[in-house]
Image (cartoon, rainbow, N blue to C red):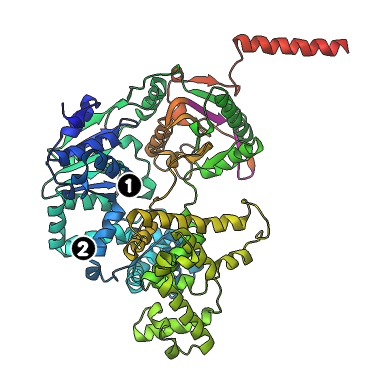
Amino acid sequence: MSFWLQDLNPEQQKAVNHNYGPLLILAGAGSGKTTVLVARTGRLIDEKIAASQNICVLTFTNKAARELKHRVQKKVGAPSQGLWAGTFHSFGLQLLRKNYKLIGLPSQFGILDQSDSQHVVKDLMKNIRNSTKEKFDVDKILNLIHLIRAKKALPVGYLPEYHEMAEVLAPLYEKSLLKLGVTDFEGLLLEPLKLFKKYPEILEKSQMQYQQIMVDEFQDTNTQQMNLVQLLSQKHLNLTVVGDDDQSIYGWRGAEIQNILNFPKDYKACEVIKLERNYRSSSSILDLGNAVIHKNEKRHGKVLKSEKKASIKDEKPEVFVLDNEDEEADFVCREIYRFKSLGYQYKDIAILYRSNTQGAFIESSLRKNRIPYTITGGTSIFDRKEAKDWLSYLKQSMNDDEVSFRRIFNVPPRGLGDTTLEKLSAYAETQNLNLPQASKKWHHADIPEKQGAIIDELNNWLWTFPTRILEDASVGDTISKRFEFLVRECGYRDYLIKTTVDSAKAGSNSMFDKRWQVIEIVGRLLESYLNLKGPNIGSIKDFIDSMQLRDDVGEDDQPQDKVQLMTFHASKGLEFPVVILVGLEEDLLPHKRLGGDVDEERRLFYVGITRAQEKLVLSYCRERKKQGLVRKVSPSRFLLETQNALYSMYEMGARPVVGAARDDLVKNFLNRLGNKESI
């Protein structure tokens, strides 16, 4: 037997042995899809079916790509060095970096995030005469602009004024991005497609380079990602996609489940392999999951079977009915204490809910009971103002970046107000310059000498910023220490102190300490990245790209011993010994406002169930406060449509006390009664 097939089940072996042509691997939850991807990639290289530089693996997280590359390199060694693995956005970025001139961008173009894109739209709307513009939701307008750029039909349910405004703004928005020398996340997918269409020779070069294409989490692909994959593989059709239609839960952000459902029809010679052996969950948990997802009609039929070697008794999932959300929150704490008494650690326990608003009640109860917890899938470090400010400093220090320059122009305050910025902008417009270029010629822009000197000081400081991070031993003995020193030198720490309400308070929980901690984290991430890639200017540029792509480099993979709180969506890809699903009620799951696609909501419930390895607890309330009023609620239809035999039901919100525990309870009661009578 081949080295690559050892310890794999027959279906996994069949997938790993596939060489040429289209392949769909339907990988159920916990079925070992990463192991299959690693083994197939390694075997293709090891057996010289394809050289590493001719293999492209597209993933949805950089962490998944790094894990795959690491595991392949560990087994194959040097011949695997050329393997390309990364996200669709990373692929688009590297293609655009190579061909930036053809799309009219500078070599080190920036990438706008959602908030920056909203600012661009707001600025454009100021110049459009429309009496209703103050009422527009900028986020909705931006979403419509993205749909227009992708040549998708605009959704119903929007006011006609929204459609009209988006139609007007879409071309202006794209022109603004070019003028600013940036793209956005949508552009990292759209621009490569335009590039391939306009320059067939670039497409042909990419097709020749990547002779084997693999896509992970294929059920999450959108139209642009599917088009990209089709173009890259159309010459050789060596396309392997791995996914699970039953875990397609991102339709609200553009994922097209039809991509995986129609794959065998789109590729006639497609081989389909089902991975139905689950190595994660107990049989009882899978029985409930299978029963829930079976109600969806549009799916590739498969039934998960447990291969988990039971070290503990296989118990049915348990459903508890509570009176209200306060009782539910207290119930969660009691369950955590119970599982702790059974030998589980806090980090073994996850609490999942449909909407973030539900988490507030749970958090409050956890704090009251002093149970340590952490929230997964909350605000990213890259979304914090402090991180965005210093990413802007880094970007502008590398190359002229108008968006970044505007952000840091007077942050921290240095005496450069809106008037100075407006004068520079007007001069830049007349001279066909970008704002950073105009700032170096402030003498011609009617800028007073005092402000001009400050601008020169800023530009000179930025000019030396990267080299001082790398080389200036006088300000710190490590990259992170040098970075922190330069942040202080710039006046940013004093700015945080002045703008933080509780900055005078001591202790790691003060708001100032939390804001400064973001700076420390950015410094550590930068140091970790440069130590890995090499401390040089090129690596700083790569670090900027990683930060803009929301890469998770440098994050600690070792979880602290805390209970995990998260939404159903945030739990995808994770697993825990104990899972508690709360709020299983109509209007929460499926969600009244967010759950337009009932099939997708059912898949979301299925994802939550299949996160559990050993114990699964579910709860719902009889009434819940909605819009300030207490209202009766009904259990989720997803629970009602499954057989009661699949779970243990506790209508009173607690397990019955039996056996020795019951005897002790009666004995204690009688003792207390006897003591009262003797008084």
Give the percent coordinates (x, y) of residue 587.
50, 38
What residue would you read off at disc 1? 60
- Mark 1 burial class by Cα count in 10 Å: few <14, some 14-19, many 20+: some
Magenta segment, principal secondary structure?
strand
Give the percent coordinates (x, y) of residue 670.
76, 10
Residue interval drawn in magenta: 616-628
Q: Residue furthest right?
A: 679
Q: Is residue 623 magenta?
A: yes
Give the percent coordinates (x, y) of residue 676.
84, 14
The reply to whether the C-beta atoms of the residues labelled 1 and 2 are less than 8 Å apart is no
Give the percent coordinates (x, y) of residue 189.
28, 57
- Mark seen at residue 88: none
When asked about the image quadrant of residue 550, the answer is bottom left
Quadrant for the C terminus in the image = top right
Vertical position of residue 5 compared to residue 223: above or below? above
Frontmost residue, 137 versus 519: 519
- Mark seen at residue 195: 2
Marks 1 and 2, Cα distance to the nearest angstrom? 22 Å
Foreground: disc 1 or disc 2: 1
Q: Left or right: where does residue 256 sit relative to residue 522?
A: left
Vertical position of residue 232 compared to residue 126: above or below? above
